[in-house]
Image: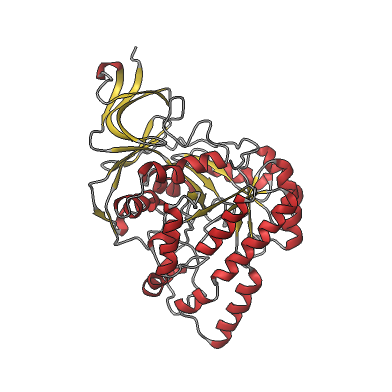
């Protein structure tokens, strides 16, 4: 009987604080041994992956993904969405409650979602629950059922239908934060102040000014910062742990980091599109690059990169928000087009290309933001998030010398649109391994089997 199920030989292994040439032994889906490069004999394993010249990282954990089952699988379902994630080097993701019918705001809705995911996800997954008006009493049952945390919108999500996800009012937000604090969960927040956004949007529409620049102006940085400040004031009252999603401005980063320094339990993420695209790209590309908060200026982007470099950004998440391509077709009115960027397949490669190859950010630092910190913050770090003995063998092999141009046909999303089509990446994911099983290779694509598992959250994941 072989000592290992698999050996990965000779890779440049990205560990917590260093990159080391090493062999990795995998047994029963776990990392069983790490040894000097060339030390493991091939006869000790049932299979050997030769990885010299490649870099081995912990698989990305994408904390912010919108897969639209149940109800809107025509936009993106678990099978297509998780395939795209696997091709992008992601080995676990956290599904958001928005854009499912019904949205995940009750145990019944959560069960419907998990029924859709079961047997359809190529990699492991967890689920966020929703904090919305009228469902405060559903928070505790959803927590018991294993949601990773809760998500709330401080501005209108954009879908006017009655069954869709709703933004919170102040009373619901404050009471919800009290209850979530008692449950030991984290509240994720879309932070834009609705009163500012609604007023400016109304003015733009009344004037008939509906260009990309007008859309961006209707969602200014001030709306983000004021919402962040309000949420932090509620956190001081309630003791609720907060996580701010898709932060787009350095000013908001500063406000959050100041609160963290004062002792508040708070983290933040930004997204690749804020680091790779600007408002000029929105003007040029149109609806395919529309999101909320909107893309910012080149100067603001550079300030965000400085925050990344200085360790002031906790994590990077895709905010993959797919839709039917027809909903992105109208270029005449940016306010009417659906907002949301399809990008989950490109997040890891974008961050390595832009962050490491072009800016020299060390791979261990990027890996902490892409994998280790999401695992730690949301209670997955007992098994996931880093390369260490005893952890799940959730791994990605990357070639840093394999530049390629992304073409539409390479996208695995149900609807093949993305603002990254036509972009040249300086690196390429060669293989993705989930719990010791190869789920994607650049040569063969994603495997037919979809063996991803639901990850029930552990209570009390707290910020250090």
**Residue at horizontal 45 percent and vertical 35 percent from the top:** 451
Please, is residue 402 above or below residue 434 in the view? Answer: below
Residue 4 visible in the displayed image: yes
| Residue extending farthest bottom | 207
State the image coordinates of residue 443 (x, y, percent, origin top left): 25, 42
Q: Nearer the viewer, residue 189 or 121?
A: 189
Give residue 10's quadrant in the image.
top left
State the image coordinates of residue 106 (x, y, percent, origin top left): 69, 48
Q: Nearer the viewer, residue 30 or 14?
A: 14
**Residue at horizontal 54 percent and vertical 44 percent from the top:** 116
The N terminus: image quadrant: top left
Relative side of 460 to 415, left or right? right
| Residue extending farthest top | 1
State the image coordinates of residue 395 (x, y, percent, origin top left): 38, 36
Residue 155 visible in the displayed image: no
Number of marks present in the image shown: 0
Q: How is the image coloured?
A: secondary structure
State the image coordinates of residue 88 (x, y, percent, origin top left): 37, 47
Relative side of 137 to 302, left or right? right
The C terminus: image quadrant: top right
Please, is residue 201 above or below residue 80 in the view? Answer: below
Please, is residue 241 above or below residue 301 in the view? Answer: above
């Amino acid at each position: 009987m072989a000592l290992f199920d698999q050996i990965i030989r000779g890779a440049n292994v990205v560990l917590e604080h260093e990159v080391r040439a090493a062999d990795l032994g995998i047994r029963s889906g776990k990392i069983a041994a790490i040894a000097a490069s060339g030390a493991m004999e091939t006869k000790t394993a049932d299979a050997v992956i030769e990885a010299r010249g490649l870099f081995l990282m912990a698989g990305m954990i994408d904390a912010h993904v919108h897969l639209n089952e149940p109800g809107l699988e025509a936009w993106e379902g678990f099978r297509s969405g998780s395939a795209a994630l696997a091709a992008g080097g992601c080995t676990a993701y956290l599904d958001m409650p928005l854009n499912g019918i019904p949205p995940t705001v009750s145990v019944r809705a959560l069960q419907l979602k998990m029924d859709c995911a079961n047997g359809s996800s190529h990699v492991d997954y967890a689920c966020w629950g929703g904090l919305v008006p009228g469902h405060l009493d559903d928070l505790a049952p959803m927590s018991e059922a294993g949601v990773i945390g809760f998500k709330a919108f401080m501005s209108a999500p954009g879908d006017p239908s009655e069954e869709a996800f709703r933004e919170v009012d102040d009373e619901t937000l404050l009471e919800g934060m009290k209850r979530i604090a008692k449950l030991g969960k984290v509240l994720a927040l879309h932070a834009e102040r609705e009163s500012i956004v609604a007023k400016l949007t109304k003015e733009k529409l009344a004037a008939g000014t509906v260009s990309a620049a007008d859309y961006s102006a209707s969602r200014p940085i001030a709306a983000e910062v004021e919402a962040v400040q309000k949420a932090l004031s509620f956190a001081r009252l309630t003791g609720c742990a907060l996580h701010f999603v898709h932060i787009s401005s350095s000013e908001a980063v500063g406000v959050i980091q100041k609160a963290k320094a004062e002792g508040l339990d708070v983290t933040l993420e930004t997204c690749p599109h804020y680091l790779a695209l600007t408002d000029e790209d929105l003007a040029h590309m149109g609806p395919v690059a529309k999101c909320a908060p909107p893309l910012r200026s080149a100067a603001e982007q550079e300030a965000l990169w400085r925050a990344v470099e200085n360790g002031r950004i906790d994590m990077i998440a895709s905010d993959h928000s797919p839709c039917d391509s027809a909903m992105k077709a109208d270029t005449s009115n940016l306010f009417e087009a659906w907002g949301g960027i399809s990008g989950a397949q490109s997040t890891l490669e974008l961050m390595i290309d832009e962050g490491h190859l072009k800016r020299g950010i060390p791979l261990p630092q990027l890996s902490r933001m892409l994998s280790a910190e999401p695992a730690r913050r949301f209670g997955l770090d007992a098994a996931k998030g880093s390369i260490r003995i005893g952890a799940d063998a959730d791994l990605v092999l990357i070639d840093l010398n394999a530049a390629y141009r992304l073409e539409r046909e390479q996208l695995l999303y149900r609807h093949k649109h993305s603002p990254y089509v036509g972009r040249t990446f300086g690196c390429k994911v060669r293989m993705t391994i989930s719990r010791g099983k190869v789920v994607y290779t650049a040569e063969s694509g994603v495997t037919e089997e979809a063996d991803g598992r639901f990850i029930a959250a552990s209570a009390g994941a707290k910020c250090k």
